[in-house]
Image: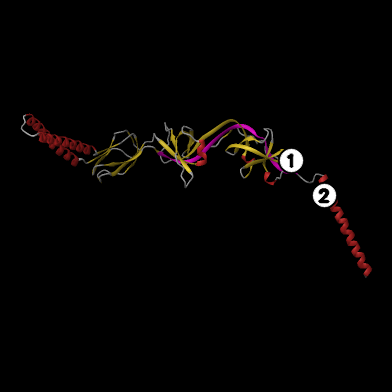
Amino acid sequence: MRKLLISIAIASLLGAGLSGCSQSDAKPAAAADGIDTAVAVEAVQPKRGELVRSFTGTATLAAERAASLVSENGGEVLKIYVEEGDRVVAGQVLARIDGERARLALAQTHSVAKRLDHEAERAHLLLDKHMIAADAAERARFERDAQRAAVDLAALSLSKSEIRAPYAGVITRRHIKQGQWLAPNGPAFEIADFDDLVADLPVPEKELAGLSAGQPVAIRADAFRDGEFIGTVERIGAVVDAASGTANVRIDVEEADTPLRPGQFVRIAIERERIADALLLPKSAVMMDGRRAAVFAIADGKAHRQPVVLGGEQDGWVQLLDGLAPDAQVVSLGQAQLSDGDPVTIVNRTSANLVPDAARSAP
């Protein structure tokens, strides 16, 4: 029994030694046969193209000139001449309010004015004949002048019985109805000038440096998907809002023959920079380590981490300023599983990895 146990132990030790030898010999053999496979990646070369950098945002159109019209006189609404949506010209009568009280007040003040005119003339004649004191004639003249001013005020009050358009525009709302009693300074109409539309766009402070008055603006409205409208940067806000970190940029819309209206939602793109022959890379190829940018450049079948200097970016493309040769191959997909010096195999799914003629951002 003792001899049997010794024999089993010797056999076990020999078996373990032979197994270790076979595994040790297997790794060099596998490496020699190329079984240590390369990482499959997609790659692209930097390409030349036009880069148009734009700041995009959304805003709501508003009329630069918009007003709420009121009746300075109270009274019954006798006649309404316009409806919502009507275009009007400056000075056009929109509605007429009962002005009988104002007419009677004008007649009364005018009558008093005629009497004071007569008294002032009589006092002047008496003064010439030294029949009254000079201060009495002067007082009669002052009373006449004051009453003439009262006549002008009464005439002005009578004119306010007609509600008129202060400028050309469109009636956007009617508050009154014919026959109703309108209180003094009660709202009657709202008017807006559709030919002077603007949009206020909040812009982050870091984007303000590239903006200036007069820059062209592309405007799109969801209601008119097939059309693009034109505008310009009118002015840039002088202060940055501490809560939002933005400043207001006023956009002036060129409204000639456009269907745009106040209150419409629009998408705005302000062209900041145009580079005709930029060296471009897809943004997906760039890795960021803090503020430092790098890519995996492929050379001799291996991926090497390469720092790069980048410029502006737009619509998924970045401008390459330094760090790579124009004919370098760069990993655009699969770099997350790479380390510096790893062997790679390029397996692009398509050959359409070229940069378009213009890398643009749609408004």
Chief SS of the magenta region: strand
Q: Nearer the viewer, residue 262 or 332?
A: 332
For marks 1 and 2 on the same chain, the one whose residue lies earlier in the sequence: 2
Left or right of 68 on screen, residue 99: left
The residue under label 1 is 302
Number of numbered discs on residues: 2
Disc assigned to residue 219:
none
Amino acid type for the residue under numbered disc 2: Lys
- SS at circle 2: helix
CA gap, disc 1 and disc 2: 22 Å
The residue under label 2 is 27
Residue 355 in the image: state x and y as whole percent: 62, 34
Q: Quadrant of residue 284?
A: top right
Left or right of 344 on screen, residue 100: left
Q: In which quarter of the image is residue 282?
A: top right
What range of the chain is rendered magenta?
A: 38-62
